[in-house]
Amino acid sequence: MKLPDQLTSALCVKCQVPSSGQTYPFFFGNKIGQSDRHLFAMPGQQRIEITTTYSIRGQDGAFVCNSCVRSYKRRHWLAFLIFFPASIVLLVFAYFVWNRTGESPIRIVSLVAGLLGGVGFFVAVGESLKYFFEERGEVGSIIARDSLYDDFSANGFDSLFTPREIRHMKKKGKV
């Protein structure tokens, strides 16, 4: 199937509204195998590496409007705007409570607030990286893939992938 690169107007696969957008590609196939490899990291601990292989059966595309692509990217920015200030507030709170209280049990609250603030900070950074570095074509393919998963699943295909995921799997030898 040849996918047009130019912007056109059609019915969006996600919002079902005719709008301007583009056809984004995705791949479909089936899981054909899985192997487990036990790796021993330290005495008493083990790490299991699971390798899954797929048979790619074809490529399709779906039309996604510009509004749905912007909305998807905007969610990452909104998550950043929520998590970043909240993490800074928690970290500042933890710092002041820790330094202003002696050996009191309230220091546990400070420790928990600090840990939550640290986790929130890393979530915020991750979301901002997705917002700034996730390509428009990849976002469109993610939306197309996710919107049509049930249809392809009903036709016997249990795995759908974006072009970026296919490139990554080919490097790892999973396709």
Image (spheres, rainbow, N blue to C red):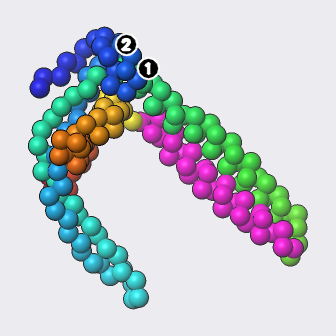
Q: Determine whether 30 is above or below 94 in the image.
A: above
Q: Nearer the viewer, residue 145 or 96?
A: 145
Q: Position of residue 103 (x, y in %)?
A: 86, 76
Which residue is tagged 1? 67
Q: Position of residue 161 (x, y in %)?
A: 25, 42
Position of 50 with respect to 155 (left or right) is right
Q: Position of residue 107 (x, y in %)?
A: 80, 69
Position of 116 with respect to 163 (left or right) is right
* Residue 166 visible here: no
Q: Rounded to the nearest whole Å, what is the CA distance between mark 2 and mark 1? A: 8 Å
* Magenta region, main secondary structure: helix
Where disc 1 sits, the SS reads: helix
Q: Nearer the viewer, residue 45 or 67?
A: 67
Dividing the picture into quarters, in which one does residue 7 lie? top left
Q: Determine whether 146 is above or below 51 in the image.
A: above
Q: Position of residue 8 (x, y in %)?
A: 28, 11
Q: Is residue 41 magenta?
A: no
Q: Are marks 2 and 1 in contact (CB under 8 Å)?
A: yes
Q: Residue at x 13, y 23 (%)?
A: 2
Q: Amino acid at mark 2?
A: Ser
- The magenta stretch is 104-133
Which residue is tagged 2? 19
The residue furthest front is 154
Where disc 2 sits, the SS reads: strand
Q: Residue at x 52, y 34 (%)?
A: 75
Q: Amino acid at mark 1?
A: Ser
